[in-house]
Image (tube, helix red, strand yellow):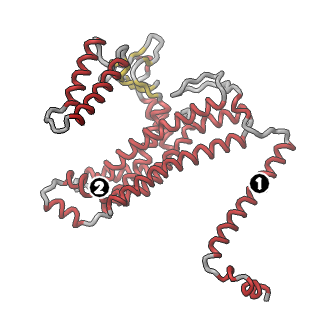
Amino acid sequence: MLIRILFNRLPLLRDVRFWPIAGQAGLVLLLVGVGTLLGRNLTQNLHQAGIPIGFDFLSAPASFAIGEYLIPYSPSDSIAQALLVGLANTLRVTIIGIIFATLVGFMIGIARLSANPLLHQAATLYIEICRNTPLLLQLLFWYFVGFAQLPHIETQPSAIAGSYITNRGIAIPWFTLTSGSVTWLLLLSLGLLAGIGLRRFRQGDRPQWWVATIAIAILLAAVLTQTGPLAIDLPRISDTNQLEGGLQFSPEFTSLLVGLTLFIGSFIAEIVRAGIQSVPQGQWEAAQALGLKSPIALLTVIVPQALPAIVPPLTNQYLNLLKGTSLAIAIGYPDLYFVANTTFNRAGRAVETMLILIITYLSTNLSISLLMNAFNRSLQIHDR
């Protein structure tokens, strides 16, 4: 009776559009209420235990060393600086891993569709092994079995193409800036701007003015500096058996990168295979009728049509790769989780440290999702 009276007095309740909105509002209120209750209980429990809550500890000295860092760091720096170092290390592995895993996934996925039985079986074996073994086990394998079998640096291994592959890490030749690099950059920038301006000013002329001005800028830079903008830095082994020079990769970083690349690459390979097979067979026949060879037809006709089906599940694998970097603590690579765990053990701020981890991983994953969703929307627009 009461429900009937309410329906008669309040016409809004009879509107079918009202109930979904009311349900969403009720869910939000429920979540806010549960969150408030949990927060209050947590605050009271910490207060009774005499444990302070807050983020003031971030300004305290970290007082622990980090083996690898992309930004300047020393134990006397703050905990916030240490967490930034861990975040930079995580993003380093994530970005490089996404690139390599995508390349491996596309190559293996295409190999799975090969008519060559040896290539097909090899790709299938790789996928089945990597997909059906835990990522942690693969990381431990590459760290303790892979690098442990490399030549020990104490034996002074010989360089291979100017590179050293040892149990202490990998070092390859790399470029370094010379004293005249600033002059080179300045003159090349001026040459490029001058060339663009001249080309627009004399649009109808045949000579490519921008090419001529860049050539003049290169000649002037070579005359003024009497050196190139870059020099090759060759790695070497010091008297104390340490790798010096070149571009160096530690065993921990390399093991993590290889493990993540092969593990995520195996899932991407299946995504690529399914995406390519989703393209109608008639597209292959049309490309062959135009005289396109199979590799050219695959890259220019089939893969672009398969991308709308590949990109959404590909995004999930990129997110899994980022989350998988947290397993780096098992092999000692100082990623964000490793640094946060060390911070918790020293500062005793478990709640704040976990909140920092959750917010950081969440925001980073959402950023990757936004970029991939934007890329996916652009593919759909082009298809139309």
Q: Quadrant of the C terminus?
A: bottom left
> Disc 2 on helix, strand or loop?
helix
Q: Is residue 92 left or right of residue 8?
A: left
- Residue 275, how many percent across, how many down? 34, 59
Q: Amino acid at mark 2?
A: Val
On screen, residue 187 above or below 28 = above
Q: Nearer the viewer, residue 220 or 27?
A: 220
Label at residue 308: none
The residue under the point 61% across, 22% down is 74
- Mark yes or no: residue 270 visible: no
**Dot 1 corresponds to which residue?**
38
Q: Residue extending furthest right?
A: 48
Q: Nearer the viewer, residue 199 or 286?
A: 199
- Residue 298, how many percent across, how many down? 24, 54
- Residue 117, how many percent across, how many down? 24, 54
Q: Nearer the viewer, residue 262 or 281?
A: 281
The residue under the point 69% across, 32% down is 58
**Dot 2 corresponds to which residue?**
303
- Residue 349, how many percent across, how many down? 73, 38
Q: Is residue 256 left or right of residue 218?
A: right
The residue under the point 40% across, 50% down is 266
Q: Is residue 149 left or right of residue 159?
A: right
